[in-house]
Every structure is written in C-alpha cells, then in structure tokens.
Image (tube, grey):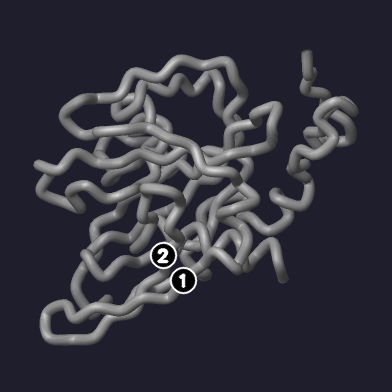
Amino acid sequence: MRKLETKNDTFALTPDASNAEVLDLDRLRSVLYPVPSRTGFVIEDGVGDEELTPASVLFPIVLRESGPSVLLTQRTAHLKDHPGQISFPGGRVEPEDASSAHTALREAEEEIGLSSAHVEILGYLPEYRTGTGYCVTPVVAIVTPPFELRPDPFEVAEIFEVPFAFLMDSANHQRHSLHHRGKLRHYFAMPYGEYFIWGATAGIIVTLSRALAA
C-alpha cells in the first residue's frame, strides 16, 4: 500500500510510488498573495467600464497518492450563467460572507458538499476580471482525502479531477478566439479528454502556471 508522507512541507510518496508528482507547498505559497489583493489583477478580453460583481472561487488541489489533482465541476445545462461549462466551485459574494475565503468555502459546500474540515487555504491569486461582468478572487487551497462529495443536482452535472501537472504544463494551454457582441475576443483553453476547460477557469489556471514558472 502506498503511503502519503509529509517532509519539509512537501508532500512526497514512498518509493513504490516514486513516479508520482511532488507538490512543493513552500513554492506554491511563495507565488500567492497571503491576503486578497486588488493591486494585482488579470483582465479578460471584453471587460469595459461597467461595475463588476464580486465573486470568489475555490482552486482545490487534491493531495492524491498518485499525485496532486485539481477538482473541477461541470455546470448543468439549464443554468442561466455559463451553462454546461467547466468551473471551479464558487460564486458571487453574499452580504453575510465575511471574506473571499468564506465565499469560496461556502459555495464549495453548497455546490459539491465539500466540508471545510478537509480544506487548507494556501493563499490567493490575483483578482480575475471577466468579460461576463464578474470580479473573481481565486482562493488556492489543498484538499486532504478521504472526503465525501454531494453535488447539488440543480447546479452541478459532474465532478471530476485533472492532474495538477497537466494543468500547469504550458504545452497544454491553447489560445482560441470567438466573436462576442461584435468583437473578437481571445481566451485560453486546455482540453482534457472529453472535457473542454476554457474561459475564466482556464485563465485562472494559466495565471497560477505562469506564476510557478517565473
């Protein structure tokens, strides 16, 4: 049986799983903001002068024995906003939310049933401003198995995981474009099997990938 060990804040595996990826938590923390910051931000194509709706998403890195993975959801097809798209757990900030982290954790529990007891927040990526009118704070966290998930059938069609190494590899990052509201807009995408990860979700992933590669 393979056993997960912790050494010097790096999650490593015993020799019989020596081919697994290793996640350096010190390095990961070093590229994140310790608190949410508005001085650094990423702007998608199509963002204008309109007021943006504050939102927060959880960027959940699951510490699997086979290597770290990122937990994502596919939204149901009937939703008004971003139907059928791949996304992080998250949503708009509610008045009762005490912080961006509170929003992300609350939404993750509501959408997929992920208990905050399994989540450790590492830090924050730059604010991500979308062409669809949101100002998103990405909350990067590690998630420690075992845990149970209970997807909300109204919002979530599927929950799945993608290897962290795949998402961080720039060779898997594609650049696409489309015409939207009379303008040509560019966006990132990273197809993985049957899943087409694109838009803000892909843009946030690219932000972390570039930070780690710098």
Question: Closer to the camera, 192 or 58?
Answer: 192
**Where does the image place residue 21, in percent across and percent down from the top left?**
75, 42
Mark 1 Cα shell of 10 Å, populated few (<14), some (14-19), many (≥20): few
Image quarter where the N terminus lies is: top right
Task: Say whether disc 2 or disc 1 marks the residue closer to the N-terminus.
Answer: 1
Q: CA distance from mark 2 to mark 1?
A: 5 Å
Q: Which mark is residue 174?
A: 1
Quadrant in the rendering for residue 132: bottom left
Type of residue at label 1?
Gln
**Residue at the extreme front:** 193
Q: Which mark is residue 80?
A: none
| Residue at 30% across, 54% down | 54
| Residue at 16% across, 29% down | 154
**Where does the image place residue 177, in percent across and percent down from the top left?**
31, 79
| Residue at 19% across, 73% down | 50
Q: Give above or below for 92 relative to 208.
A: above
Type of residue at label 2?
Ala
| Residue at 30% across, 26% down | 110
Question: Closer to the camera, 33 or 154?
Answer: 154
Q: Secondary structure at mark 2?
A: strand
**Where does the image place residue 106, in percent across and percent down from the top left?**
36, 30
**Where does the image place residue 208, in percent across and percent down from the top left?**
58, 59
**Residue of label 2:** 189
Question: Closer to the camera, 100 or 211?
Answer: 211
Question: Viewed as shown, does residue 122 lie left or right of 194?
Answer: right
Q: Secondary structure at mark 1?
A: strand
Q: Give above or below for 82 relative to 148.
A: below
Marks 2 and 1 close (CB-CB < 8 Å): yes
Image quarter where the C terminus lies is: bottom right
Question: Viewed as shown, does residue 197 lie left or right of 29?
Answer: left
Mark 2 Cα shell of 10 Å, populated few (<14), some (14-19), many (≥20): many
**Residue at the extreme bottom:** 183
